[in-house]
Amino acid sequence: MAKRESIFRSVARLLVIAVSVHLSLLAAEVFAQASFFQGKTITIVQGRDPGGSGDLRVRALVPFLEKYIPGNPKIVMEFMPGGGSRKAANYLFRTAKPDGLTIGNLSGGMVSLAVLGESGILYDLEKFYYLGSPYSTYHAVLVSRKEAGLDTIEKLRATPGLKLGAQSVGFSTFLEARVFAYILGLKDTSFIAGYSGVELDPALLRGEIDLRSNGADTIVQRNKDWLKGGVVNFHAITETPKGEKHPAFPNLPEIETFAKSPLDRKIIAMQRAFRVTGTPFVLPPGTPKDRVQTLQDAFRKTYKDPEFAKHYQKLTSDEPSPLMPEDHEKAIRDVPRDREAVEVFKRLANAVALPPRR
């Protein structure tokens, strides 16, 4: 009996020592990360122009990341538009110093461009470290200016040469606009890229372009007068995920109602999958694993903070639907890669004539 009690006391002492060592190491790691980030500045490189909805989504995170990253570093923005976030993604992959002080925020176009094997892709999706996205639901809405008189889908289809405006070729809004035009069967549409997000609305109302695609939440936040009628016509919506209705557009026809073939449905499924990845936050390859984990944890805490949800909704007029880092990696791995759909999508992602419907 005495021997058994002695063994028990010895095991208990070993457990106490093990727990103490673990807590000491954990405290040392936290202190080391706090020491590294304290007094530093983190730069978020955005693959877009400032002022649009994507920029607002990023800014909604900043005060919470500054709170949750150990050492409370300052966070600043750098804007690097071009090539559907291709330019920024290439910079993060090949040039940015992998020390945890440079974070990328890119359009979902960086995922589609890589999956489709587009030219100028100098990055590997599998080698980035992912920090998640503040949203994974998205509603793209096709809009035309009222003065163009295109108040029905039939009129859109019957009018050749419509000018559809977008941001850079390959950017997510460019791609979703092209998918709308393809699935709706528009004729000889001209695609005019090169606008910033905030330039597209006045360009539409001035008549420089006839159509554009934009996020429903952005319209609610930035164009409340459009919802009252008399300014624009709303034609169709893409729900991501399928069946997720937007409260401002509950009766707008969903894009899949216009699908005519299994290939059409594959194209729409691929577009939804690209959009589920949201706007990826990434770290360059080679970033030290402990800093990756620290930053991933700070993003998780931000996404889960109830005050973040309120702040995000205030800035964007939309509720966040966060994608955690581990789920983000899975969403990118699970993007469909059907050969026939990829072939058509490659045409849609470029400034060439729309492919014929099959």
Image (cartoon, rainbow, N blue to C red):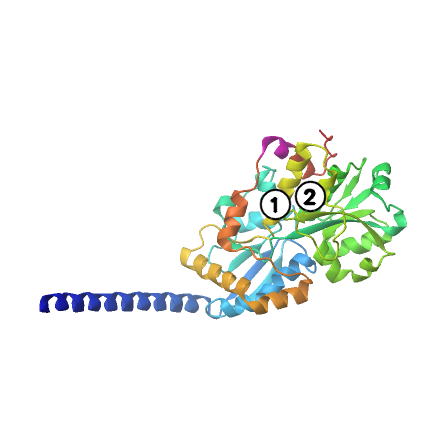
Residue 68 at what x, y percent from top left? 50, 68
> Which secondary structure, mark 2?
helix
Q: Residue furthest front?
A: 1
Q: Can residue 179 be seen in this view?
A: no
Q: Which residue lies furthest to the top in this view?
A: 358
Q: Earlier in the sequence, mark 1 or mark 2?
A: 2
Q: Nearer the viewer, mark 1 or mark 2?
A: 1
Closer to the camera, 4 or 162? 4
Residue ID for mark 1:
274
Residue ID for mark 2:
175
Residue found 60% across the figure and 57% down from its top: 321
> Which secondary structure, mark 1?
helix
- Mark 1: few, some, or many residues within 10 Å (few <14, many ≥20)? many
Residue found 61% across the figure and 64% down from its top: 60
Q: What residue type is labelled 2?
A: Leu
Residue 266 at what x, y percent from top left? 64, 36
Residue 197 at what x, y percent from top left? 72, 54
Residue 122 at what x, y percent from top left? 55, 42
- Residue 31 is drawn in which quadrant? bottom left
